[in-house]
Image: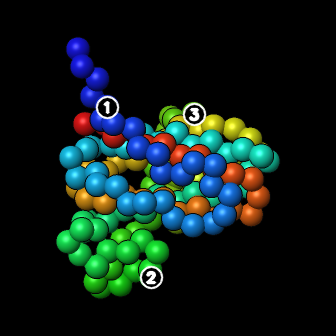
Amino acid sequence: MPSPLGKQVSLFADKAASGYSASIDVSEYEKIMLAIAGTETANLTVKVQGSFQMKADSALDFTAAQSKTNLWDYVACVDLQEGATVITGDTGLVFSGDHVRLYKVNVAGLRTLGLQAVITGGKVTATAYPLK
């Protein structure tokens, strides 16, 4: 039986400075699984950003403020280590130290997804695995 997972997408690779990932099209998926690793004594927060808009055909810009024409928000996710803990989008995924965490993001209805990292120490690597 073929895997329901789509192609994995690297969003951050040893990112050491605050910033944003590239936006990815999630319009064909129900969920996105995220594997996020903090290294080198990480002290950082990663927030998931989502939008109903497509970057290619709109003014969508995750690096700019939200507005009536730049329709995006931070998206909640589920921590798979505990299974039921929902992390609110505004809080984000907080890392202190070196470890790997797995998350599930419900993207049903969303068209575009990205990550924002606020890094005060260490590095972050993040990979998305689309799930139909």
Side of 24 where 40 appears, left or right: right
Q: Is residue 63 left or right of residue 123?
A: left
- Using the image, tell me which numbered label, if any, was put on residue 47: none
In the image, residue 56 sits, relative to residue 44, either above or below, namely below
**Residue 52 at what x, y percent from top left?**
25, 65
**Residue at label 1?**
5
Q: At 29% from the left edge and 85% from the top edge, which residue is drawn?
A: 68
Q: Mark 3 sits on what residue? A: 81
Crowd class of label 1 (few under 14; some 14 to 19; many from 20; radius 10 Å): some
Q: Position of residue 113 (x, y in %)?
A: 37, 58
Q: Which residue is mark 2?
A: 65
Mark 3 neighbour class, 10 Å CA radius: few under 14, some 14 to 19, many 20 or more: few
Chain-order first, disc 1 or disc 2 = 1
Which is closer to the viewer, label 3 or label 1? 1
Mark 3 or 1, nearer chain start:
1
Q: CA distance from mark 3 to mark 1?
A: 20 Å
- SS for tag 1? loop
**111 vs 81, nearest the viewer:** 111
Residue type at numbered disc 3: Gln
**Where's the N terminus, which quadrant?**
top left
Q: What's the distance in space between the residues labelled 1 and 2, CA to CA? A: 32 Å
Any part of residue 89 in sight: no
Give the secondary structure at mark 3.
Answer: loop
Location of residue 110 by image quarter: bottom left
Q: Nearer the viewer, residue 74 or 21?
A: 21
